[in-house]
Image: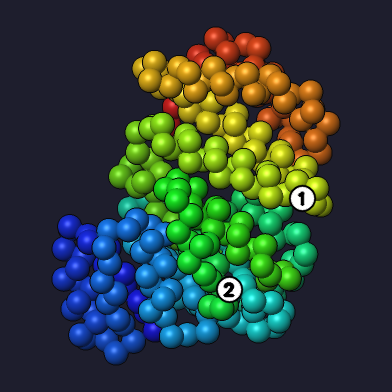
Amino acid sequence: EILLVDDHSTDGSSEICQRWAEEHSLVRRVPGTNRGANGGRWLGIQAAAGDFVLCSDADDLAHPQLVEMLYRAVCTTGLPCACCRYDTFTGTALPDPEYTGPAAEAWRDTQPRHALLHDKRVDWGLWNKLYLRDLLTQDAFETGVTYNEDLLTNWILLGRVPGMAFVDFAGYHYRQHSASISRRALSQKQLDDQMAVACRIESEAAATPLEKSAGAFRYEKLLYLYSLILRQRDRSPFAETARTYRERIRRDFSAMRSNPFLSSSMKAAALASGWFSGPYGFFCRHFLEKR
């Protein structure tokens, strides 16, 4: 089945969803109440009748064999979820070569959560992953954050599974455009939400085999958010937050120097941003502004 969650779109999507539901027996329109990305996803999950669920964002494209490929992966590995690679595109659709392999890998124990934090093939999105429906609960989707909500949801869900199947094939096409939520002007909520998610992950990983992995991730997020502020032409609205971030970067640097999951480039960025923020800010504004 294909569930189209109509979350009060104002661009004519509602009429398109209704028409598709009337013309195709596998399509159902699910009315929403403007609850945002994860709220809309939860509405769709509640309406789902199948044993497995895959979420897709409204502006992206999927490989014709995406569901088949991921479902085959969970069947062959016996694991309750599966993930594939993704690629990005702008404007026009990408060609879809037939999927002929390789076979799915079985990632077990803490490997899926570690990969979520550090393996860019996995990404934080929900859209390149197939999940057993019974794993999906309201608390995992309605987490109270708007930014990095998919990262937090996946962190919660992957903590409930014995492992995840991974297929090394780009089955999902992620559209890049300036109107997407992730590319909107910087706001304090964007900073607060992302930092809160990273800190929660670090807290929940404390005293577990993922402790250093999560600690490195939180520090990388701190460096990234500080660089976002430095990229702004007018940084005055975030001056206090910037001071706090810089203090944390300096405070935690000695501990992070020996963290095996923090790359050399991140350690260099920490040195530059913590002790040479003037030149580093110039670099961010002129070379990282659009990244």
Mark linked to residue 135: 2
At label 1, the amino acid type is Leu
Q: Secondary structure at mark 1?
A: loop
* Label 2 – label 1 distance at C-alpha: 21 Å
* Above or below: residue 39 compared with residue 74: above
* Above or below: residue 215 compared with residue 234: below
Residue where numbered disc 1 is placed: 210
In the image, what residue occupies the spot 73% across and 35% down?
Answer: 263
Please provide percent x and percent y for residue 280. 57, 16
175 or 141: nearer the eye?
Answer: 141
At label 2, the amino acid type is Leu
Q: Quadrant of residue 64?
A: bottom left
Please provide percent x and percent y for residue 8. 22, 61
Left or right: 135 with respect to 27? right
Q: Secondary structure at mark 2?
A: helix
Please provide percent x and percent y for residue 182. 41, 44
Q: Quadrant of residue 232?
A: top left
In the image, what residue occupies the spot 74% across and 24% down?
Answer: 253
Residue 93 seen anywhere in this rendered image of the structure: no
Q: Residues within 10 Å of mark 2 (few under 14, many from 20)?
A: some
